[in-house]
Image (cartoon, rainbow, N blue to C red):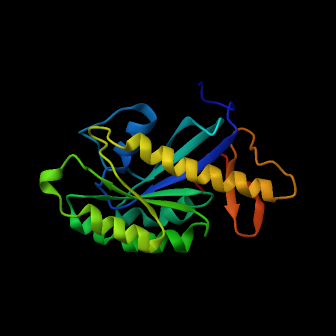
């Protein structure tokens, strides 16, 4: 389907996690089916979009990728604004990136909407021989924190589609059920608007025009 205004819902999803865990390649694999071994660290913020079908509706995902380096942290509080989903990514072969998940989760909960849907993603599952974080450990942490969990490989594309499909489906079902509970207002943004679901507004506020801040 051509990108543009031919969609029923537009959801902003952010990618967070340490630098080098593969966030940019997850984004490019999902939106363009590309992987770049020479991928450079993201400077600042970039985003890409892709539309998928969920329950017969066209959902356009606006997926934002930020730099994991500390020196770009000032950008990130504005970066979370309007996000309804987050993929919290670590590298299964680097335990330090998993240890930092707790800090990223705190930042997300400090800056993002309280209803944001969060998925913990163990990337680089192709590096099985270098695994430093067990699947069971990460799964248990995700359950304890109320997150969904998946392991992916942007390199060989395993589970990348499933990760985005699952989180977008979760978001869609929450938002569509809220719209049914509301006073009859249908959440259907026009081009360029991002749905924000807030605890006080079942009808879904609207904000954003594709700009970062």
User: Is 116 on the left or on the right of 40, as rendered?
Assistant: right
User: Is 8 on the left or on the right of 141, as rendered?
Assistant: right
x%, y% of residue 4? 65, 30
Residue appearing at x 70%, y 65% in the figure: 198
* Residue 212 visible, this orientation: yes
x%, y% of residue 30? 42, 38
Q: Quadrant of residue 25?
A: top left
Residue appearing at x 56%, y 36% in the figure: 52
x%, y% of residue 91? 27, 57
Residue in the foreground of this view, choosing between 143 and 132: 143
Q: Residue furthest left?
A: 129
Looking at the rendered structure, the number of numbered marks drawn on it comes to 0
Q: Quadrant of the N terminus?
A: top right
x%, y% of residue 31? 45, 36
Residue appearing at x 27%, y 61% in the figure: 135
Q: Residue furthest right?
A: 183
Q: Residue furthest top?
A: 2
Q: Quadrant of residue 18?
A: bottom left
* Residue 207 visible, this orientation: no
Residue appearing at x 68%, y 60% in the figure: 197
User: Is 194 on the left or on the right of 146, as rendered?
Assistant: right
Give the answer, above or below, for where 98 lies relative to 193. Answer: below
Q: Quadrant of the C terminus?
A: bottom right
């Amino acid at each position: 389907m051509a990108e543009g205004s031919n969609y029923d819902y537009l959801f902003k999803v952010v990618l967070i996690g340490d630098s080098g865990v593969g966030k940019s390649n997850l984004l490019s694999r999902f939106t363009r089916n590309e992987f770049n071994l020479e991928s450079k660290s993201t400077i600042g913020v970039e985003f890409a979009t892709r539309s998928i079908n969920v329950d017969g509706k066209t959902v356009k995902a606006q997926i934002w990728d930020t730099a994991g380096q500390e020196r770009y942290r000032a950008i990130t509080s504005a970066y979370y604004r309007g996000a309804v989903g987050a993929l919290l990514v670590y590298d299964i072969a680097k335990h330090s990136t998993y240890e930092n998940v707790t800090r990223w989760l705190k930042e997300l909960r400090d800056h993002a909407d309280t209803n944001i849907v969060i998925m913990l993603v163990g990337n680089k599952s192709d590096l099985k021989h270098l695994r430093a974080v067990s699947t069971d450990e990460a799964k248990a942490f995700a359950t304890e924190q109320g997150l969904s969990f998946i392991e992916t490989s942007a390199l060989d594309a395993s589970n990348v589609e499933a990760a985005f499909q699952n989180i977008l489906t979760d978001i869609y079902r929450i938002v569509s059920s809220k719209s049914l509970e509301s006073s009859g207002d249908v959440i259907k943004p026009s081009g360029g608007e991002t749905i924000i679901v807030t605890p006080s507004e079942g009808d879904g506020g609207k904000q954003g025009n594709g700009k970062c801040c």
